[in-house]
Amino acid sequence: MAVEHSFTNFRKQLLSFPELGFALDVSRAPAPAGFSEKMAPAIAKAFAEMSALEKGAIANPDEKRMVGHYWLRTPELAPQASITQEIKGAIADIHSFVKKIHDGSIKGSSGKFTDLLCIGIGGSALGPQFVADALGTAKDRLKIHFIDNTDPDGMDRVFAHLANRIGSTLVVVTSKSGSTPEPRNALIETQLFWKKAGASFAAHAVAVTGKDSELDKVAVKEKWLARFPMWDWVGGRTSELGPVGLLPAALQGLDIDALLAGARAMDECTRVADASRNPAAQLALAWYHLTEGHGKKAMVVLPYKDRLLLFSRYLQQLVMESIGKEKDLAGKSVHQGLTVYGNKGSTDQHAYVQQLRDGLNNFFAVFVEVLKDRDGPSPEIDPLTSSGDYLQAFLLGTRDALSESNRASITLTLDQVDARSVGLLIALFERAVGLYAGLLGINAYHQPGVEAGKKAAAKTLDVRNRAILALKKHSGRWMSSVQICEEIALVGSEEVVFKVLLHASSNPGLVLRQAHMDPGSTLFKHS
Ligand code: PA5
């Protein structure tokens, strides 16, 4: 069976916004008969909730917070004049700070800044990374680098790139809570790296964080170069168009006003309370019928453009951290989700597209087509044919192949990749996620699972420290993980103790190991 498609249907279903350089085609993801009528009350409710959210309702009930990312690009929408002023003030501060960095009125210890190191994780990294990669060029004002983990070797790789340019590297540390372990660790290691080089870190450092957070306090105490706000009414994964994303993008030399303008323009289209004309509602409704309102199929995001490679990674967090919830708003266990993966075409045609075409039918594809190939003309590769023509042919061909084997797909078309179109893509999916959460009756704006992961890691570190202290206490004695657990009264934690000591003894410092194939017979000693 094939997904039925025809030019007539394409014309009927295409939502085209020529003034935005954007179109959405859901014609190859046909809804079952009567679906629009059936969903009319649910989507009307989702529109009403979205409108209340934009007016300042407590749309994140668990955290008792307003959800204000739409105000970031239209500050006048904010429910209080003070918020409008804060947003405008932050944007003005970003422009003025960035100007001083670019014109050299603020310099690093060895002169004008050349590089930018961004430290952050999750919502404090994925948006900035996506935008930096989508819009960066060889002419960037500052060369941008990221540390988004607590992987020592990952940090060393970045430090090796910066080794000769520490004196001209600006460091932006981003964390809304200001206490997330990964950026905290990366900050401490970066400070040590600066210290070893004999450079003042504070004179190179900027914080983007919540007021009075741990990070904020450090930045104040150490007199960092500047601080920019993260407000409690903006969630991490929807903060890209606030200081989190705007500051690094502006430092890189990207047009942040165009990013904001793109998002604002998309917000206008997606605020329309008529699902048939609203591209975000069309997406949310398509997700609903394609996955039976329960994530039964994954969304494979396939932009045929190298610059959009990180889009799927960015969307993975935006969608999965927002939609992947155990409970609905009424407290009922629903275990919701929408799996997102993807990279880019046509590259992925030589990887997993084989399975998409012929294997499990457990997904739908979202193709992103970009009409402009490059600045200027392209050479002929074959008569009348450029590399870009090949790229489009691969997209259209794969889409047809999927339709033929009954695989649904949605196609987004952009005139080009620029700051404006990236802004509108971000705004489109932010709104689609919000409306979809409305259809499902879940809170899209909290992340209890992330907190659970942080707590579990803290518990593991506690077990590790107790195990090492036990070895220290019995210095000189070889002990098994079973003996250590008895010693620290943590019977039942043998596997964790074995794992953390295996790791500790694989690195210079605290612990030695007598290896054995059986973890129970492996012995450890304080070094
Ligand atoms: O979307 C979110 O809220 C999370 O992914 C956070 O961005 C992430 O956990 C990092 O948190 P923070 O910015 O507080 O360091």
Image (cartoon, grey):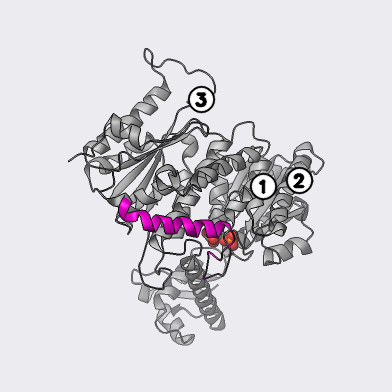
Write down the residue under mark 1. Answer: 247
State the residue at coordinates (29%, 31%).
8
Q: CA distance from mark 1 to mark 2?
A: 9 Å
Write down the residue under mark 3. Answer: 374
Magenta range: 37-63
Write down the residue under mark 2. Answer: 97
Q: Position of residue 320 (x, y in %)?
A: 43, 57
Q: Nearer the viewer, residue 403 or 148?
A: 403
Left/right placement of residue 176 relative to residue 202 reads: left
Task: Please state which amino acid type lies under the numbered disc 1.
Answer: Leu
Task: Please state which amino acid type lies under the numbered disc 3.
Answer: Arg
Please say if the residues under marks 1 and 2 sit with CB atoms less than 8 Å apart. Answer: yes
| SS label for mark 1 | helix
Q: Nearer the viewer, residue 282 or 349?
A: 282
First of labels 3, 1 by sequence position: 1
State the residue at coordinates (75%, 38%).
102
Left/right placement of residue 346 relative to residue 81 reads: left
Q: CA distance from mark 3 to mark 1?
A: 27 Å
Q: Is residue 54 magenta?
A: yes
